[in-house]
Image (tube, helix red, strand yellow):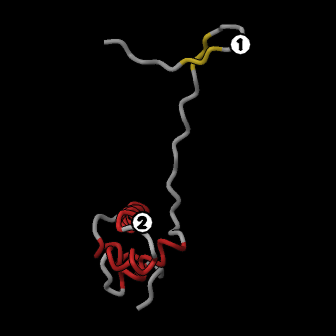
Amino acid sequence: MATLRLVKVTRAGRRRPAAPPAPRRRPEALTSREQEILRLIWSGLKNKEIGQRLKISVKTVEAHRANMMKKVRVTNTAQLLKSAIQEGILRI
């Protein structure tokens, strides 16, 4: 089976290996919008209620929640809230 190799063709027509794309790193800190949504989750609101309050779609709320969970490296909302309290993002 042949392997795929990226090459860059120069103006002179020479071929040379292309540099691999730089990995995109996810920012570790929560944005102000994510922090706002996190506070609303903590207050017990559902995604639909958060969307109505912030005038954004439910899908956008879900995307923010998913991004927060990736940044904090957790798999559910309970772990997200626990980590936010432990890291001082949320205060009880």
Tell which residue pokes out farthest to the top in this image: 13
Q: Amino acid at mark 2?
A: His
Q: CA distance from mark 1 to mark 2?
A: 44 Å
Q: Secondary structure at mark 1?
A: loop
**Which residue position is annotated with label 1?**
11
User: Is 52 rendered above or below residue 30?
Assistant: below
Q: Quadrant of the C terminus?
A: bottom left
Residue 50, quarter of the rendered image:
bottom left
Q: Earlier in the sequence, mark 1 or mark 2?
A: 1
Residue drawn at x 71%, y 13% as measured from the top left: 11
Residue 15, quarter of the rendered image:
top right
Rendering coords of residue 48 (x, y %): 32, 75
Q: Secondary structure at mark 2?
A: helix
Query: Could you say which is closer to the camera, residue 54 or residue 34?
Result: 54
Q: Amino acid at mark 1?
A: Arg
Q: Quadrant of the N terminus?
A: top left
Rendering coords of residue 29 (x, y %): 52, 67
Residue drawn at x 60%, y 18% as measured from the top left: 8
Q: Are marks 1 and 2 in contact (CB under 8 Å)?
A: no
**Which residue position is annotated with label 2?**
64
